[in-house]
Amino acid sequence: MEGMLKEGSFKGKTIIITGGGTGLGKSMGKYMLELGANLVITSRKSDVIEATASELQKTTGGKVLAVPCDVRKYEEILNVIESAEREFGQVHGVLNNAAGNFISPTERLSHRAFDIVVDIVLKGTYYFTLAAGKNWISKKQQGTFLNIVTTYAWTGSGYVVPSACGKAGVLALTRSLAVEWAKYKIRCNAIAPGPFPTEGAWSRLLPGDLVKKFDPAERIPLKRVGEHQELANLAAYLMSDFSANINGEVITIDGGEWLRNGGEFSHLELIPNSMWDALENSRKKN
Ligand code: HXC
Ligand code: NAP
């Protein structure tokens, strides 16, 4: 659960994190600050990002700029990038982490409920990517994108269909631009986390008594959820120059969860040794 990269790995680098005031965005930002980055955090709630900025500045001694922005509004994104450049000179990386999500049978959703999630997840990510990418290309600057998706970006998942559609689009965006913009020295990668406890995710995906009924760790071969520092280590690596030759990749960090639940016979872990012994004995007899 310790930091992985060497001290000063982000010295002189400016990183923007969308949804950086809470949860995983905050944890990833904190680690990049500890590694010497200048950090720009953005989300809709200015009081939340302001509070996080002053907390992180105090705990890490780094510089944090909080700029409110709804990622569905292109003009507001341009303002974040301009503010970041005014404060720190140049932006080196964008971590597209902001998301919206909730569970529901799809037939109970209004079209506006579908829109709200897809607009934050997919439109928010491609708006930020377009704005930052155009800026880097016009100034002939290198840049790195890291997009946070989920494992159901490729399997799909019932009950979170708008999120699955949005995240699938983000994965397609990541892989497409990794190839198209490599000529500008712009890299695009993604991380697909399994369950990592955050207030934002738990309150919406395990509301009410669901948290008592469904233990996410039960579905995971390693029988535990993720630690924020584990994700922060991976994110920092993928946004750092140490991963300079990794491009168009999605790295899963889920303890084996999605493979286990796709594997036809994974449930045979429920068979006790005594039953395996009996099966083996009867095979040997025949
Ligand atoms: C069905 C819902 C709903 C719900 C809202 N709506 N919540 N429908 N079930 N639980 C509908 C509303 O009725 C409305 O449609 C429309 O969606 C907009 O709702 P608002 O509340 O006005 O939207 P807003 O206040 O902008 O809030 C957006 C939000 C909210 C997405 C609904 O949850 C939010 O702010 N989320 C941000 C953070 C977040 O979601 N974090 C979790 C990420 S976790 P009508 O038709 O009534 O107008 C994650 C993990 C994935 O992604 C993988 C885990 C392993
Ligand atoms: P979180 O704390 O709720 O983070 C989501 C952030 O997105 C919030 O800070 C929110 O801030 C911001 N946001 C939402 N709508 C926005 C908008 N329109 N414009 C700008 N910012 C907006 O939840 P989290 O668990 O840390 O999730 C972070 C990322 O990890 C998400 O991409 C999520 O899909 C992904 N993920 C999480 C898990 C998990 O188990 N936690 C698993 C897989 C993937 P405001 O409300 O202030 O705007």
Image (spheres, helix red, strand yellow):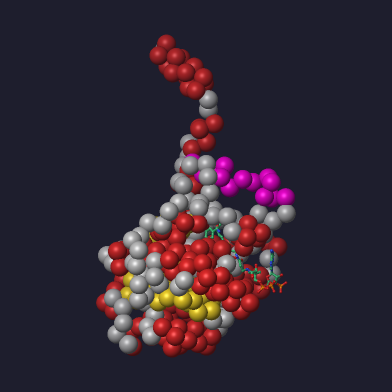
Front in this rendered view, residue 11 or 168: 11
Query: 222 above or below 55?
Result: above
Percent x, y for residue 115? 61, 73
Quadrant where ligand 2 appears: bottom right
Q: Residue at x 39, y 66 (%)?
A: 35
Q: Please state if 135 lies on the left or on the right of 45 as rendered.
A: left
Query: 121 above or below 224?
Result: below
Front in this rendered view, residue 98 or 22: 22
Q: Which residue is drawn at 46% across and 47% down?
A: 255
Q: Main secondary structure of the magenta part?
A: helix
Q: Please state if 174 lies on the left or on the right of 57 as rendered.
A: left
Query: 93 above or below 246?
Result: below
In what quadrant of the picture does the C terminus appear? Answer: top left
Query: 140 above or below 197?
Result: below
Does residue 243 appear anywhere in the picture?
yes
Percent x, y for residue 87? 44, 85
Inspect the magenta stretch and tell me whether residue 158 lies in it.
no
Which range of residues does the magenta coloring cover? 209-221
Q: Please state if 220 lies on the left or on the right of 85 as rendered.
A: right
Q: Residue furthest top?
A: 285
Front in this rendered view, residue 7 or 49: 7
Does residue 19 appear anywhere in the picture?
no
Count of numbered circles on the image: 0
Q: Residue furthest right?
A: 208
Percent x, y for residue 150? 49, 59
Q: Residue at x 50, y 51 (%)?
A: 226
Percent x, y for residue 76? 54, 85
Q: Which residue is drawn at 52% across and 21% down?
A: 275
